[in-house]
Image (cartoon, rainbow, N blue to C red):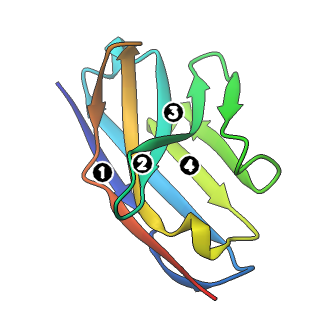
Amino acid sequence: QVQLVESGGGLVQAGGSLRLSCAASGRIFSINAMGWYRQAPGKQRELVATITNGGSTNYADSVKGRFTISRANAENTVYLQMNSLKPDDTAVYYCKAIVTTAYGYWGQGTQVTVSS
């Protein structure tokens, strides 16, 4: 099992910034990548960004140039720096520890609300 604890969500005005953190514990050796996903009300959960153990990153087109995913391996923590936030970024953000393309562990989610 892998346990994930997220923090850093909140309320921010459009154009502002937030940084999300996700600390992993447990069977961390089974993790091949980490990711951030989000789910807005009435919408499906969608990929925001991923980062592999080797440091390769991938972003949704909607956040490219505004969000940055990074990791601190010594602390088993992954971050999502979110800049130039828009109201459309409002969602519950979930951290995921990716074991395979079909299997992983989810965090409990943290609410991000961007006001216009």
Graded by Cα atoms within 10 Å as few (under 14), some (14 to 19) or many (20 or more), the crowding at tag 4 reads many
Residue at x 70% of width, y 50% of height: 62
The residue labelled by disc 2 is 22
Residue type, numbered disc 1:
Val
Residue 91 percent location from the top left of the image: 44, 64
Circles 4, 2 touching at the beta carbon (< 8 Å): yes
Q: Secondary structure at mark 2?
A: strand
- Could you tell me which residue is drawn at 76 percent across and 70 percent down? 84
Horizontal side of 38 relative to 17 (left or right) equals left
Q: Are marks 1 and 2 in contact (CB under 8 Å)?
A: yes
Residue type (three-letter) at the residue carrying disc 4:
Tyr
In the image, taking residue 62 as reference, residue 26 lies left or right, namely: left
Label 3 close to label 4 by CB (< 8 Å): no
The mark that comes first in sequence, 4 or 2, is 2
Can you say whether 53 is above or below 89 in the image? above
- From mark 3 to mark 4, how far is it between C-alphas? 13 Å
Residue on which the image places disc 3: 74
Q: Amino acid at mark 2?
A: Cys
Q: For the residues marked 1 and 4, what is the alpha-carbon distance in whole angstroms?
A: 12 Å
Q: Which residue is mark 4?
A: 79
Q: Residue at x 30, y 51 (%)?
A: 5
Pointer 1 or 2: first along the chain: 1
Within 10 Å of the Cα at label 2, are there few (<14), some (14-19), or many (20+) other Cα atoms? many
Label 1 Cα neighbours within 10 Å, binned few <14 / some 14-19 / many ≥20? some
Residue at 28% of width from left, 38% of height from top? 106
Identify the residue position indicated by label 1 in the image: 5
Instruction: Name the N-terminal-most of marks 1 and 4.
Output: 1
Q: Nearer the viewer, mark 2 or mark 3?
A: 2
